């Protein structure tokens, strides 16, 4: 049991120091972790960490980290979430779909599978509202109003 805890801590340390810390903000980190989940198997995989640690240990550590980061993101105020989202969008230059259904599908991928339904709904609701605000702000800026 001690070895398992020690391994888990080391995986999380390696993940945070090498891969998460360089990323700009909580949304970039959250989306990075979501991207490590294989959609075919629903298991988290990391090519570099799996070379050093057992794949099951990597999966468990990444899943837990994704859940914790998801919850921490939701603990931010809506204004802080907005700033974090803007920071992510500015850094990646990745457009958010204008269609609400496509947005919802995109945001669904960012949510950990084990998250409770009420947190999934809160996350989706927050992001949809923030994207509507950002889209409206950008539309006004382009039209000069």
Image (cartoon, rainbow, N blue to C red):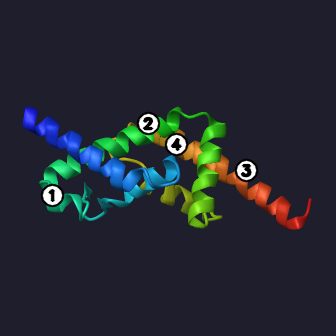
At label 2, counting other C-alpha atoms closer than 10 Å, the crowd grade (few under 14, some 14-19, many 20 or more) is some
Q: Which residue is mark 3?
A: 133
Measured in 3D between alpha carbons, the distance from the residue under mark 2 to the one under mark 1, in whole angstroms, is 28 Å
Asked if residue 33 lies left or right of residue 24, the reply is left
Residue plotted at (24% across, 65% down):
47
In this view, the residue farthest toward the right is: 145
How far is disc 3 from disc 4 in space, using C-alphas?
15 Å
- The Cα–Cα distance between marks 4 and 2, rounded to whole angstroms, is 9 Å
Few, some or many residues within 10 Å of mark 4 (<14, 14–19, 20+): many
Sequence order check: which comes first, mark 3 or mark 4?
4
Locate residue 107, reporting x and y percent: 50, 54
Reading the chain from its start, which is encountered first: label 2 or label 1? 1
Does any portion of residue 33 appear in the rendered image? Answer: no
In screen coordinates, is 56 left or right of 105? Answer: left
Asked if 85 appears above or below 116 in the picture, the reply is: below
Q: Nearer the viewer, mark 3 or mark 2?
A: 2
**Which quadrant would the C terminus be assigned to in this image?**
bottom right
The CA distance from mark 3 to mark 1 is: 44 Å
SS for dot 4: helix
Give percent across and percent down for residue 117: 42, 38
Residue for badge 1: 52
Which residue carries the number 2 mark?
71
- Asked whether the residues under the numbered discs 3 and 2 touch, taking CB atoms below 8 Å apart as contact, a structural biologist would say no
Q: Position of residue 81 (x, y in %)?
A: 60, 42
Quote the CA–CA distance across marks 1 and 4: 34 Å
Q: Secondary structure at mark 3?
A: helix
| Residue 40 pos. (x, y %) | 26, 65
User: Which numbered mark, 3 or 1, is in the foreground of this view?
Assistant: 1
Q: Kindly identify which residue carries mark 4.
A: 123
């Amino acid at each position: 049991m001690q070895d398992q805890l020690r391994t888990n801590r080391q995986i999380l340390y390696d993940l945070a120091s090498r891969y998460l810390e360089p990323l700009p903000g909580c949304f970039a980190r959250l989306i990075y972790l979501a991207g490590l989940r294989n959609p075919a198997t629903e298991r988290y995989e990391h090519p570099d960490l799996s070379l050093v640690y057992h794949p099951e240990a990597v999966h468990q550590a990444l899943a837990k980290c994704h859940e914790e980061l998801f919850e921490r993101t939701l603990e931010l105020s809506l204004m802080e979430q907005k700033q974090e989202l803007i920071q992510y969008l500015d850094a990646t230059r990745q457009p958010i779909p204008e269609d609400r259904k496509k947005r919802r599908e995109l945001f669904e991928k960012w949510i950990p599978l084990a998250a409770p339904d009420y947190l999934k709904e809160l996350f989706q609701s927050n992001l949809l509202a923030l994207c509507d605000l950002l889209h409206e702000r950008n539309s006004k800026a382009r039209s000069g109003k």
